[in-house]
Amino acid sequence: MDFQIKGNILRKEFKNVVYEYMKSNERCQKKNMGMTQAQIFRECGMDWGEKKNCTSSNQQYWIVAILRELEEEGKIQRDQFTKKWRLI
């Protein structure tokens, strides 16, 4: 098994989960306030809960990378004042 390929597939799947979630959530629509990365992270099922030496906050690096990828693709934006994410 090629773990690099499998990891790439999983990253793409997680990015799709986040984008589909944001498209389906009223708070993430263009004219609405948006959501924090922590809210999106938890509501997309990525939080493993509090673990020894790995708090929920530390686990959020995945969602940061996913949101920045979607931002680079021109699909979402982060409000500069509220720091919340929404669709473009």
Image (spheres, rainbow, N blue to C red):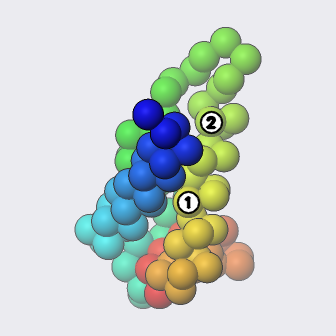
Residue 70 in the image: x percent, y percent?
Answer: 53, 72
- At horizontal 67% and vertical 12% (from top left) the residue drawn is 52
**Chain-order first, disc 2 or disc 1:** 2
Secondary structure at badge 2 equals helix
Disc 1: CA contacts within 10 A as few (<14), some (14-19) or many (>=20): some
Placement of the N terminus among the 4 image quadrants: top left
Between 33 and 87, the one lying in front of the other is 87
> Is label 2 or label 1 in front?
1
Secondary structure at badge 1 equals helix
Residue 74 in the image: x percent, y percent?
Answer: 53, 86
Residue 30 in the image: x percent, y percent?
Answer: 42, 85
> Is 44 above or below relative to 56?
below
Q: Which residue is mark 2?
A: 59
Between 36 and 45, the one lying in front of the other is 45
Q: What mark, if any, has residue 66 been given in the picture? A: 1
Residue 25 in the image: x percent, y percent?
Answer: 31, 66
> Is 43 above or below relative to 36?
above
Left or right of 73? Residue 15 is left
Left or right of 15? Residue 51 is right
- At horizontal 47% and vertical 87% (from top left) the residue drawn is 88
Task: Name the kind of residue labelled 2 in the image.
Answer: Gln
Q: Are marks 2 and 1 in contact (CB under 8 Å)?
A: no
Report the Cα–Cα distance between label 2 and label 1: 13 Å
Between 5 and 37, the one lying in front of the other is 5
Q: What mark, if any, has residue 54 been given in the picture? A: none
Disc 2: CA contacts within 10 A as few (<14), some (14-19) or many (>=20): some
Task: Name the kind of residue labelled 1 in the image.
Answer: Ile
- At horizontal 58% and vertical 20% (from top left) the residue drawn is 50
* Res 22 visible: yes
In the image as oriented, which residue stretches furthest toward the front?
A: 1
- At horizontal 38% and vertical 54% (from top left) the residue drawn is 13
* Res 84 visible: no
